[in-house]
Amino acid sequence: MELFGIAAGQLGLFVSFGLLIGTLFGFFGMGGSFLVTPALLVMGYDSTTAVGSGLAFVFGTSVIAALRHRDHGQVDYKLGLMFIVGMTAGIEVGKGVVYYLKALGFADLVVSVSYIGLLAIVGLLMLRDARTESADDDEGSALAEKFQSIKIPPMISIKGGTKVSLWVTLAMAFAIGILSGFLGVGGGFLLMPAMMYGLGVPAAVAVGTDVFQITASGAFGAFTYAQSGALDLTIVLPLLAGSAMGARIGAGATALVDEDDITEYFAAMLLAGSAAVASRNLGNAYDMGIFNQLSQVLIFGSALLVSAAVIWASIQSIREDEPAESVHAAD
């Protein structure tokens, strides 16, 4: 049975996966296409379709999440606009690299290997941050001070009470944009740490601003890939149907739960994503189906685990607040 040109089972899978990813995206300001793109690679889609569809998914999900973060006052529009400008230029460069590698016949291999390394590195760094919080706070503050000490005019004020150079911010955005266009990621899992550790932006504001700028960069990236015919609506639309609810759940949870409480789970998900792409490559290289099955279990299982952790932590937070509210009402 098919609906809208896609098998009913696959349609349900995409909608469910969109719900999980939307929850993660709304809560962390990341977790969009950096999971969707490798998931599509795992399912056998070619690299350009996976990248283009991943960016289109990021655009739709970010619009929903950005509206919720705006309601919580967690968006620095000035900073977001600067990252939009820098990342837009970078995405075009990254896209050019993908098509150049495709012409050489290396695109699938290079994108997959890059995902493995990048997700593993960021995941390990976040896991270290979660387990050595005080030490990393000092390191992050020192790094932010170094960037803030580069006083190339004009200097701009950002939320958190600090000033940074316009050119330093644009350079950072351009570098992340190249990765976004090359890997098909919205840049959130790189941009959020860059804002926090590099610019000294508060965590909640980093999440909201991250989601805001991804709305624009994701739209531009999806548009450029769509012009080349590398966007599959039978993938994007079911994913967006699920993420519409998930993004609202995740964004709402930021008002209830401190994202640091689930940092270890998120780091584990990044590492699982890295392992999933590596497993798929091994399965294809040695024609061993067990590795391909393992990769699917890792990519979907990690999303389910972390999404469930976000929702559970939110429920626990609400339950803990209820007794306090009852006491105040009794007084």
Image (spheres, rainbow, N blue to C red):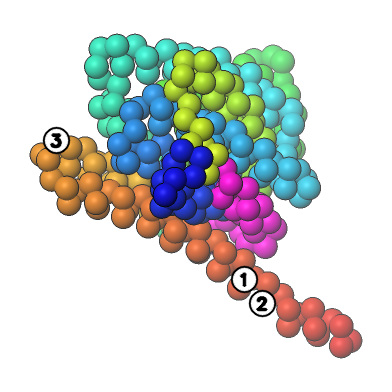
> Residue at coordinates 66% horizontally, 77% vertically from top-left?
319
> Residue at coordinates 51% horizontally, 37% vertically from top-left?
236
In the depicted view, which residue is nearer to us: 272 or 280?
Answer: 280
Look at the numbered disc 2 and give the secondary structure of its residue: helix
Residue 143 at x, y percent in the picture: 52, 35
Q: Amino acid at mark 2?
A: Arg
303 sits left or right of 330 in the view: left
Q: Amino acid at mark 1?
A: Ile
Find the distance from the CA under tag 1 to the CA under tag 3.
44 Å
Residue 276 at x, y percent in the picture: 29, 46
Is residue 256 on the magenta stretch?
Answer: yes
Does 115 sit above or below residue 83? below
Look at the numbered disc 3 and give the secondary structure of its residue: helix
Q: Which is closer to the viewer, label 3 or label 2?
A: 3
Label whose residue precedes the other's in the sequence (1 or 3): 3
Q: Amino acid at mark 3?
A: Ala
* Residue tagged 1: 315
> Residue at coordinates 40% horizontally, 31% vertically from top-left?
50
Label whose residue precedes the other's in the sequence (3 or 2): 3
Q: Main secondary structure of the magenta part?
A: helix
* Residue tagged 2: 319
Question: Which residues lie in the magenta part?
Answer: 239-263
Find the distance from the CA under tag 1 to the CA under tag 2.
6 Å
1 and 2 marks in contact (CB < 8 Å): yes
* Residue tagged 3: 285
Does 107 sit above or below residue 76? above
